[in-house]
Image: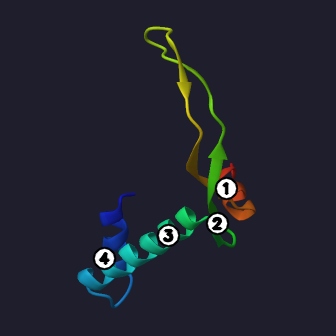
Amino acid sequence: MKKTDLIQRLTDNSSLSKSDAKLVVDLIIDRITQSIVSGEGVEIRGFGGFLKKHRKARQGINPKTSERTQVGEKYVPFFKPGKSLKEMVNKD
């Protein structure tokens, strides 16, 4: 599902106009982004959590040339799924 699909579903399943639905989606994504960047993170019960993880510097290898290179430390966004989401995904 893309962002436009989400906006369309919001429009179809509520009394929101397309522009209002777009504004709602943009505000939610912006707030989640700001929380991750600040290190605060976001937890949505039953769905999961978004946070910022630190990765240490390491040796990297270019798979094409086998050349070794140093990869610096950095922060990466991380999603940890909640128990309910894991169970739903693994249902047979």
Q: Is residue 66 left or right of residue 15?
A: right
Q: Secondary structure at mark 4?
A: helix
Residue at image mark 1 = 80
**Label number found at residue 22:** 4
Q: Is residue 32 left or right of residue 41?
A: left
Q: CA distance from mark 1 to mark 2?
A: 9 Å
Q: Label 4 crowding class (10 Å Cα cut-off): few <14, some 14-19, many 20+?
A: some
Residue at image mark 3 = 34
Q: Nearer the viewer, residue 24 or 32?
A: 32
Residue at image mark 2 = 47
Q: Amino acid at mark 3?
A: Gln
Q: Secondary structure at mark 1?
A: strand
Q: CA distance from mark 3 to mark 4?
A: 18 Å
Residue 23, image x, y percentages: 32, 80
Q: CA distance from mark 2 to mark 4?
A: 22 Å
Where is the N terminus found, in terms of image quarters?
A: bottom left
Q: Which tag is nearer the camera, tag 3 or tag 2?
A: 3
Residue 32, image x, y percentages: 51, 70
